[in-house]
Amino acid sequence: MVALVIAEHDNGSLKGATHHTVTAAVQCGGDVHILVAGSGCGAAAEAAAQIAGVSKVLVADAPHFADGLAENVAEQILAIAGSYSHILAPATAYGKNILPRVAAKLDVAQISEITKVDSPDTFERPIYAGNAIATVQSSDSVKVITVRGTAFDSAAAGGSAAIEAIAAVADAGTSSFVGRELAKSDRPELTAAKVIVSGGRGIGSADNFKILEPLADKLGAAMGASRAAVDAGFVPNDWQVGQTGKIVAPTLYIAVGISGAIQHLAGMKDSKVIVAINKDPEAPIFSVADYGLVGDLFEAVPELVKELG
């Protein structure tokens, strides 16, 4: 058995989700290869070669891979898929855009957002917003899998894999890159942050969200939000944590003014320590919180900042 991990990268460096995906691939058994498809992506390939557990890095370098267009990357994967028993990618926007195309063209069932590898052909994945865990056994000759990174440890450094250049497939010509708008922030990226301070509808307004900033600054935290806060226009979409937002599992998650709808809990309940601040003692968020404070957030948050010095 040989597993192929599809690297998510920016041509210069790997995204953290790739390291978590490698851990899942190693647990599938056999060798692990990584495909780096990009343009001028030598640095990303070098980084991939240094991941422990990886035996080979395949590099497809061509201008039409520069922006990770799914139509082109999927064709590159299909060109080499016959050599692999497992094809894995992070369950991020990148992986979710590419692997369904691969699975469809291979005529196999994709296994989405796995959280555990039971054996080379059996995996666990959450269903019903994380309220149940499905155990899925696949008899397909190639297992096409997306990996929920928060469920797997990041693969360590210390590897020395061989790097091999492979022939790049031609540009599919069915899509073109137009532009990208990136949110700029000095705070950690939400899905990679060790501490997250999130606000909900209870914050009341976009201006009131500023009350969370000193707390996030003290803790070096990323800032997140519930869907209700995003839908109300308090904060940008990329702050959303939950089933339809970003799945996170930081060391510390502080939920302020968040009632705890099931969709939100599905995105953060695997956090190591959860602290909830809410004036409603019956709020569902307290059912998953390790520490809960029933009180007015507009008094509690400044007091907490003060105590943090």
Image (cartoon, rainbow, N blue to C red):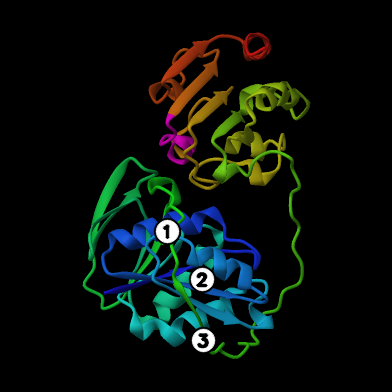
**Residue 255 x/y as whole percent:** 55, 26
**Residue 51 x/y as whole percent:** 45, 60
Question: In the image, which disc is placed on residue 67?
Answer: none
Tag 3 secondary structure: loop
Which region shows up in magenta?
264-272
For residue 152, side relative to residue 164 (left or right): left
Nearer the observer, 299 or 220: 220
Asked if residue 240 is positioned above or below residue 48 in the image, the reply reads: above
For residue 182, side relative to residue 20 (left or right): right
Asked if residue 190 is positioned above or below residue 69 in the image, the reply reads: above
Query: Reading the chain from its start, which is encountered first: label 2 or label 3?
Result: 2
Q: Where, quadrant-wise, is the C terminus in this rendering? A: top right
Residue at the spot of label 1:
21
Nearer the observer, 116 or 130: 116
**Residue 231 x/y as whole percent:** 65, 40
For residue 283, side relative to residue 143 (left or right): right
Which of discs 2 and 3 lies nearer the camera? The answer is 3
Tag 1 secondary structure: helix
- Residue 50 appears anywhere in the view: yes
